[in-house]
Amino acid sequence: MNLEQTLTDELASVATGIDVPPPPAVAAVVQQAEQSRTRSRVRWTATTLLAAAAVVAAVVVGNQIGRPNAAPSPTGPTSTATMGTFPLGSPLRTYVDPAKGTLYIDGTPQPGAWSDAVTLGGLTLGYGRTTSTDGATDIGVFRGTERIGVLHDVAGPVVKVSPNARTIAWVEDHHTTGVIVVADVTRSAVHELGRLSAATLVAKPDDESGEQLITVGDDGTVTYGGVTSGHAWRPGGAPRATDISSLMYGPTGFPSRAEEVRLDPTGSWGAWLTDARDPAAGGGFASWGAVTFQQPGRPATKATLRMPAGFSDVRDLYWESDTDVVLDISSGDTSTELITGHVRCSVLTRRCESAPTPGSP
């Protein structure tokens, strides 16, 4: 008898029978913002100063901008499935041609040269290809397919987006000091709400006093800090000390072996890559063969989708919507980081499809 397996099965049985309350996953969304993808990709964040009940209400009511309400959880049991041949799905919603630098939003090409972009609801942030010597870059702000503003000299480059996608915050690198900028994003423009200088935001990497921007809330309140301190500030007021310890850890409510769990925009689902491949003794790029979904604190919703031959070199993932995850697929050669295709998987249907790039045959 395999004692370890028996104990594992019994514990899993007990866990699935427990009525777990909805988790306050919003704080975890903040931490995953710092687990940046291979390409710079902005994350949804939310203010951590809300009470737990308000957090749940915000997830249910306020986080759906330009999207339908979050769909219900699947009722099927925990499962593992190996995918077969993928049907052809719709093109990627947001895509940057790596060779030409062309940005496509909902199939429409945008002028300029871009390195990456992400769409959250009706808000798209496009990262310019040109960066300064200290890593700052310009970022285009789009509503739908219309560019409504440009953020200059963004450090990181990192932009924080509020849960309702109407407030953004970033840091400008002014060499001797960092400046937090908070802005309101309307249908037609980006309106600054306030600025705050903080030299600790551009401290040297080995300086433990260095701080970073962590979240922005719908009301414009930002949290920032580091190892030694945490702060909250809202335009029009003065900074105040705040506890950011809960933001320094990853999402909770997932298996202990789950690494780099990425939460969907509402915090209702987590996804992570599994079945890690050995990048070979000579070194190489990390690669995985499957993706796993689960709702926080609800192990019965866990499902693993293993990719078939030809798609089993998964390099990264990101959420395209509240229920769809996109996997970046490579050629199988871990010595190269070339992305050769994309697969879109649904946490509700637990099915996947090939996601072509805009303009591809």
Image (cartoon, rainbow, N blue to C red):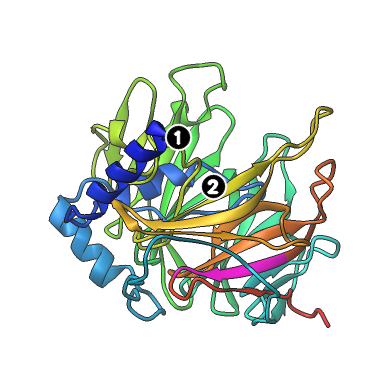
Kindly identify the residue that appears in the image at 19 percent across and 51 percent down: 50
On the image, the x and y values in percent for residue 124 come to 55, 68
Label 1, label 2: how far apart the Cα atoms are: 10 Å
76 with respect to 133 (left or right)? left
290 with respect to 56 (left or right)? right
Compared with 261, 192 (above or below) is below
Q: In this orientation, does residue 310 appear? A: yes
In the image, is residue 279 part of the stretch drawn in magenta?
no
Kindly identify the residue that appears in the image at 41 percent across and 73 percent down: 186
- Image quarter where the C terminus lies is bottom right
Q: In this orientation, does residue 151 appear? A: no
Nearer the observer, 258 or 18:
18
Compared with 281, 113 (above or below) is below
> What label sits on residue 158 in the rendered view?
2
Tell me whether circle 1 and circle 2 mark residues in contact (CB < 8 Å): yes
Kindly identify the residue that appears in the image at 35 percent across and 63 percent down: 266
Compared with 352, 68 (above or below) is below
Residue type, mark 1 in image = Gln
Most prominent secondary structure in the magenta stretch? Answer: strand
Task: Kindly identify which residue carries mark 1.
Answer: 212
Which callout, 1 or 2, points at the residue further toward the start of the chain? 2
On the image, the x and y values in percent for residue 17 come to 20, 55
Kindly identify the residue that appears in the image at 43 percent across and 69 percent down: 322
Image: magenta residue range: 342-347
Instruction: Name the quadrant containing residue 340.
Output: bottom right
Task: Say few, some or many: other residues with alpha carbon within 10 Å of mark 2 (under 14 / 14 to 19 / 20 or more).
Answer: many
Per the image, label 2 sits on a secondary structure element best described as strand
Residue type, mark 2 in image = Val
On the image, the x and y values in percent for residue 9 come to 34, 45
On the image, the x and y values in percent for residue 358 come to 74, 78
